[in-house]
Amino acid sequence: MSRSGDDSDAENDIDLDWLLGFVDPPRHACDLLRHRFPSKVGGRPAWLDPVHLPTRDQLTCPATGHLMQFLIQVYAPTEDNLNAFHRSIYIFLSPDGSSLSSPGAVKAFRCQLPRKNCFYPFDPPKKEARAPPALSTSQLEASLQRDPWKSEEYATAKETIKQNKPSSPFENTGKNDAKSQQKSQQPALFTEAELVVEPEPDETAPERDHQTAALIAKYQRHTEIEGEYTEEELPTEIVDSFENAVPEAQQHFAYFAAQIAKEPSQVLRYCFEPGARPLCPAPGGIPEADSVPCCPCCGASRRFEFQVMPQLLNHLGVDVADPKAPDWGTIVVYSCSKSCGGGSGGGVGGNELEASPENNKSSYIEEFVWVQPPV
């Protein structure tokens, strides 16, 4: 694995449309439920397909053998695939956050549905629709049996209790030993928030040239006072020492810092276009396109889709002194360039047969994740 130079990265970025994600409190709690098709951080997953959930094996960390923790989901529909009218990608972390660069310690799952499906109306949800569309009894049972977070039960309880009095859906669970035990067996939750996605601000030509103009002015002031070296007069050893004065790692981090400085609070960078590359604080190990495994379902190449920035760590509500607290330089997701359905459950056609709980296949396709350790 190798990487191209920073100049190449900068040139490529100019021609790409990037989206940036920011953490923000939701206006309404129901905005983070599945029928609102949210992008969100922490809390419980808002499963796009609420029935054909990831299997226990999919959600288990191979290193620790324990259930993984839900980190983030990104709602990212595609325009060139009718079966991906609704499309979300979910990221889960190992409970041992100190070793996230280990194989399988971070997993990403993609789920998608056509516009006409069995779980959601054809048209966007109305404002008054505060709860997700109800599942059948058998679908709900299948969902709760498979879901460690009991997201569907939580969503229903959240709205029911809110209509009676403002409180937590689990406020009184301590009075019920069975429910308390069930809650204790659920994975730990990160602080929940909405992920607001906006276009990256355009960098105008004057802004790009500002630093160059400043350097030219400084050079002109110097030559007016000290005179100017010709190429012949400038010793070769000075040129060589100047070119090697700043190590590549420092140059790379300077470019990283300059990009982040445009929007310091960004926690997500998204660009599902050919040629997009992750923005990383260190140059080492960034996968090249030909080293990313192809989609195991359809054989298509995978390409960069988005990355989770280290700034998100400030919003998770974790104890930074905990040696097992999560930490990363960046988390990068590469997904199937065709957004294939993978031949799974309700994520392909969305018809009644596929939405049946008897179809126990997972609609959640695992994608490729690369994690750069913290610098």
Image (cartoon, rainbow, N blue to C red):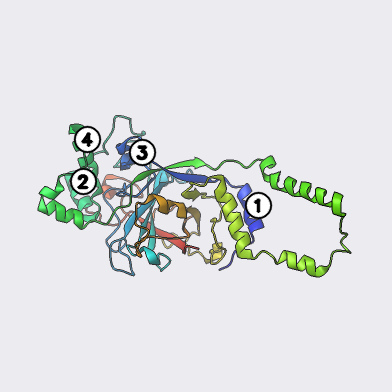
Q: Callout 4: 10 Å neighbours few (<14), some, many (20+)?
A: few
Instruction: Read off the residue under disc 4.
Output: 166
**Residue 34: x %, y % from top left:** 31, 43
Mark 4 near mark 1, Cβ–Cβ under 8 Å?
A: no
For the N terminus, the image quarter is: bottom right
Name the residue rendered at 86%, 59% in the picture: 229
Whole-angstrom CA distance, mark 4 to mark 1, is 52 Å
Name the residue rendered at 36%, 51% in the picture: 316
Nearest to N terminus: mark 3 or mark 4: 3
Whole-angstrom CA distance, mark 3 to mark 4, is 16 Å
Left or right of residue 125: residue 340: right
Q: Secondary structure at mark 3?
A: loop
- Of tags 2 and 4, which is closer to the observer? 4
Disc 4 marks which amino acid?
Answer: Pro
**Residue 262: x %, y % from top left:** 57, 45
Instruction: Read off the residue under disc 2.
Output: 153
Disc 1 marks which amino acid?
Answer: Glu
Whole-angstrom CA distance, mark 3 to mark 1, is 36 Å
Q: Eyeballing the image, is 318 above or below 265?
A: below
Q: Secondary structure at mark 2?
A: helix
Residue 26 shows which numbered tag?
A: 3
Name the residue rendered at 24%, 42% in the picture: 155
Disc 3 marks which amino acid?
Answer: Pro
Q: Callout 2: 10 Å neighbours few (<14), some, many (20+)?
A: some
Instruction: Read off the residue under disc 1.
Output: 11
Nearest to N terminus: mark 3 or mark 2: 3
**Closer to us: 148 or 316:** 316
